[in-house]
Image (cartoon, rainbow, N blue to C red):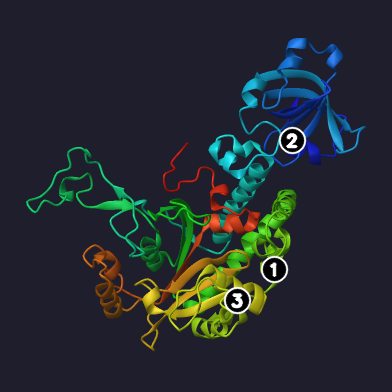
Amino acid sequence: MLTKKVVELLETDHILQEYKVNGWVRAFRSNRFIALNDGSCLDSLQCVVDFENTDEVTLKSISTGAAISVEGTLKESEGAGQRVELEVTSIEILGIADPEDVKKTILQPKKHSMEKLREQAHLRVRTNTFGAVMRVRSKLAFAVHQYFNENGFNYVNTPIITGSDAEGAGEMFKVTNFDLKNIPTNEAGEIDYSKDFFGKETNLTVSGQLEAETFALGLGKVYTFGPTFRAENSNTSRHLAEFWMIEPEVAFCDLEGNIDLAEDFIQYVLEYITRHCASDLEFLENRLVQDEKSKPEKDRSPMPLREKIDFVLKNNFKRVSYTEAIEILKNCKPNKKKKFNYIIEEWGADLQSEHERYLVEKHFGCPVVLYDYPANIKAFYMRLNDDGKTVRAMDVLFPGIGEIVGGSQREERYDVLLSKMKEIGVDEKELWWYLETRKLGTCKHSGFGLGFERLVLFATGMSNIRDVIPYPRTPQNAEF
């Protein structure tokens, strides 16, 4: 007998055949109708039980949350609500779920708050919302690898433990093998890292970019896709302490080529999920519509979920210099009437999400790429322009979310890079290897970083980044 997934049976035209299917009971009504879901899709398979010829012990064990295996004949459904159903000939109880225990959990079939779902993150993937989100996340991750593979990139696994701070911000988690009750010190009373496991001070990585650059300068086109960590004490709906980053780096590529790559990449992965996650996206859109009815209009999404995705797919990204964007923002109504939380007064301001969204949603009506930012608000590795005050940086801005991609043409000139590192206090001895690449066959090269959870947030319409990663790590929370 063929064992099939629920999604296969719901889509097949081969009826009046016998199948076996495993899954979890979503509902059991009238001692006859089982809604069986196995996570392969949003919908459940209706399994019709001949209760008069099924023993009482088995019937009592078919409760919400239980894992079961059923065999039967797939038939056209006689009732409304489903195309096919499985006429059950045998049932095996694989794992019981006591109804009294289920009542204490989010498996109980009723609406639960998002906070309650986070408290039971080990169970939330068995709800419709999180099943849909995690299927979309999975498909997006596959599309990321497929895009880069199809376009000649090499996948590089950069270190998770590192001695360098790629962002120069210092918000890093320390890694140590010291007995924290007996930390060795030197004569100056400072921690003696020479006695630690790696013989030096080390941290969890904030980015694989610097290492990826060195590989691009040998393999030409590379990308990383791995976990990164920020010890930023931000307890917001947009920040995580542990998240995944996609970081391509390309040799012989300038800023314009980098923007082209970002636009093509984003449109590819979003188009992929529109083809492979249609029912999940429809469900998430309907969920979002219902959820936003209780919000003030100004806090609602600018457009329905699938329309928002189409907005990115069907519009060319508008390329605008930072200087031009500042002039637009300075003279716009929300700024003049002080409706922005952060008023734009002069060139050099670090743009906030509200400014970015205004440019995308109100002024241009399409995704926007801002470029040539002030050097003093960007990282040391970005290429300095001839004006001496801006760098070849770019950010991609999306509706509803603001910045989703940040990248730049990298500073390939040894003297300029060294000067910038000294200026902001980046340890040149720690990054000797990074500097050396600028003396041994240096060339222009570019890349960008895209926080994967930000992409999943956009693609699913979820409002909190903690709800698009299996187990969120945030300040004061490392549960599960």
Upstream in the sequence, badge 2 or badge 3? Answer: 2
Is residue 290 or residue 176 the one in the foreground? 290
Q: Amino acid at mark 2?
A: Val
Q: Nearer the viewer, mark 2 or mark 3?
A: 3
| 306 shown above or below 318 | above
- Structural crowding at the residue carrying mark 2, measured as other residues with C-alpha within 10 Å and reported as few (<14), some (14–19) or many (≥20): many
Q: Position of residue 342 (x, y in %)?
A: 50, 73
Badge 2 or badge 1: first in the primary sequence: 2
Tell me if mark 1 has few (under 14), some (14-19) or many (20+) residues whose alpha carbon lies within 10 angstroms of its own: some
State which mark lies toward you, 2 or 1. 1
Q: Residue at x 58, y 74 (%)?
A: 339
Tell me which amino acid carries mark 1: Phe
- 471 above or below 263? above
Residue of label 3: 359
Percent of width and height locating residue 441: 32, 74
Q: CA distance from mark 2 to mark 1?
A: 33 Å
Q: Residue 332 location in percent, x, y?
A: 60, 82
Q: Quadrant of residue 38?
A: top right
Name the residue that disc number 2 marks: 6
Q: Could you tell me if the residues under marks 2 and 3 are in contact, i.e. CB atoms within 8 Å?
A: no
Spatial separation of the CA atoms under disc 2 and disc 3: 44 Å
> Residue 243, relative to residue 74: is it above or below?
below
Q: Residue tagged by mark 1?
A: 311
Q: Quadrant of residue 264?
A: bottom right
Above or below, 215 against 112 in this view is: below
- Amino acid at circle 3: Leu
Q: Quadrant where the N terminus lies?
A: top right
Residue at 30 percent across and 70 percent down: it is: 437
